[in-house]
Image (spheres, grey):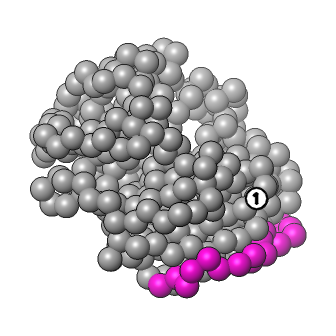
Amino acid sequence: MKRKVGVLATGLLAMLFASTVAVSQQATGSLFFANRVSGAYAAGYFDRYGDFHQTWLPGSTLFKAITSAISTPNGILVYNSSTGVGIVVQVKDDGTTSTLTYLFSPGWDNIVSVGDYLFFYKLDGTAAVGQITADGAFTAGMSYAAGSVPRYTSVIATANNVFLYNSADGSAATAYVYKGAFVYSQALLAGSVPTGYTYGLGLGNYVLLYNQLTGSTLIGVIDGRPGTFQSRATATLPAGYSKLVKHGRYALLYNPATGASTIGYVDRVSAAKFVITQQPAFSTAWTSIVSTNDDLLFYNSGTGAGAAGRIDDTGKFSQTPQSLPFSAGWSTVAATSR
């Protein structure tokens, strides 16, 4: 039986101020950069030839001490977990940006975008739901007191659902958001899923779980909404990956210490087997790898080095020839949602 989680708790946020008036953002593919030390931010995009163009670099200290950035269909939520300050950023067709600033509860451990909604989760079982509207405004849905949701170490958004997983005991759950409420569709007891997975990635309706120490990988599927999680296939990939990026139907896994990587996809025809298409050797120390419409941006915040490339229809990566000498210090890079 489907059930809504917990009880209505105290309000999630109160609006502070609007930095600039927000209107609907450019749909996909723009890039947002922020420096959590200086608070500066910038925007740009890749054209159809793979060339990068900077469009916005205002003088600002707005984004000091930010801890995460979550892309949604109507804007990017930039969040400071220490203070609770959240800033909704929209990147326009002309490359300029607008921002609206809110005060959320501090300390959210996970914030994920699922469909048109945002799901907020703390390890103490507190949860909340919200939504960024087309004009960049944040509207709060239901919020749930501590203990309403069990403890999970990973919160992974798929195409229509949320998968929650506890790496210590193998318990898990599937849920979805309906009219601003968080609704369980399945609860899996301890031991239902193998333990030890340290990273997860949503790939359409599929969930990829990966153990960084061993390379052990599990592919599961959540079809439809409401849906239930089913384990479909296992694989052993190289250990050590700490960055997992979705790019179209492909997954890119990357080890910044060695530069090793794996590109692959989930094959529906072969019972959800993970098919490796390439294992390229990249440069080390990329701090951000971000997917836009067609391109992948690689960026090193320590040096300012940047590179870009594309994954073709056969799953092979090719680097574009342009040089990308960014300034150093961009701690957060996010793309407007596809």
Badge 1 marks a residue whose secondary structure is: loop
Asked if one can make out residue 141 in the rendered structure from this viewpoint, the answer is no
Question: In this rendering, is residue 31 above or below 141?
Answer: above
Q: Residues within 10 Å of mark 1 (few under 14, many from 20)?
A: some
- Residue numbers of the magenta segment: 6-23
Placement of the C terminus among the 4 image quadrants = bottom left
**Residue at horizontal 52%, vertical 33%?**
199
Which residue is situated farthest in the front direction here? 59
Q: Residue 207 versus residue 16: which sits nearer the camera? A: 16
Question: In this rendering, is residue 317 above or below 33?
Answer: above
- Residue 242: horizontal and vertical position, in percent? 48, 28
**Residue at horizontal 83%, vertical 72%?**
11
Question: In this rendering, is residue 110 above or below 274?
Answer: below
Write down the residue under mark 1. 84
Answer with left or right where residue 336 lies relative to residue 20. Answer: left
Q: Residue 202 versus residue 86: which sits nearer the camera? A: 86
Answer with left or right where residue 150 lies relative to residue 114. Answer: right
